[in-house]
Image: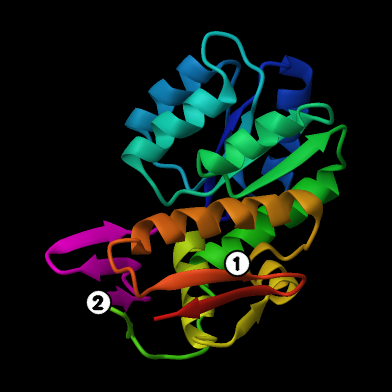
Amino acid sequence: MNNTKILLAEDDNNLGILLRNYLAAKNYETSLFINGSLALEAFSTKQFGLCILDIMMPEMDGLTLAREIRLSNPLIPIIFLTAKNQKEDIIDGFKSGADDYITKPFSMEELLYRIEAILRRTTNPVVHKKDESYIIGGYSFDSLKQMLIYKDQSIKLTTKESELLELLCRHGNEILERNYALKTIWIDDNYFNARSMDVYITRLRKYLRKDPSVKILNIHGRGYKLIS
């Protein structure tokens, strides 16, 4: 049995049962909930390793549920299920901390691939340089603990924030190619993942703004450059 327990929130009962049975056949213990309120109640009492959330649900939608989940566990991977015409909801989902999305209709194999890709990233983070810490201007960044420290203030980064900041550090004062970063962290360099990375870059800039000498520059047509 796979050790990862999945929380599945899907108000379409037929689809939910189909997904739960498929994931169970792939050795993922999956708990199905038909609305966001029931899912949040279960999340507060049980241990899960990954969440799959439909965006449009009664009582509590997937975006609200994701924000509530993030309050108690900022690092748990979240995948959104969404209709093709909900582009703005997808962007809002990434802003709420989602790791990936999948549009309906989708194949079970695609969902399984995305689950496995996320679990590979979160259980085996992308770390090539074994240094535990980087100095970024007045900041200290501990890549193993995922902590960004400025004077007496500490920020606990999410896995993706930490992976992206580490890539920028490893390419310090050099250009981090956009497609390379996308394929390294997000696996796929599609439009939505690119928009997701933009959101994470904005977050990192906000975290680093206390030191005016530290900047993440946009290099038009190529990527980003961290300077300090």
Q: Position of residue 110 (x, y in %)?
A: 82, 50
**Region in magenta:** 139-157
Quadrant location of the C terminus in the rendered image: bottom left
Q: Nearer the viewer, residue 73 or 15?
A: 73
Question: Badge 2: few (under 14), some or many (20 or more) residues near its Cα, within 10 Å?
Answer: some
Q: Which residue is mark 2?
A: 138
**In the rendered image, which residue does mark 1 sit on?**
120
Q: Which of the image's four quarters has the N terminus?
A: bottom right
Q: Which of the 4 quarters of the picture holds residue 54? A: top right
Chief secondary structure of the magenta portion = strand
Q: From the viewer's side, name the closer residue of 104 and 224.
A: 224
**In the image, what residue occupies the spot 57% across and 19% down?**
61
The amino acid type, in three-letter code, at marker 1 is Arg
Relative side of 9 to 156, left or right: right
The quadrant holding residue 35 is: top right
Residue 144 part of the magenta-drawn span: yes
**Does 109 appear above or below 14?**
below
**Is 183 colored magenta in this rendering?**
no
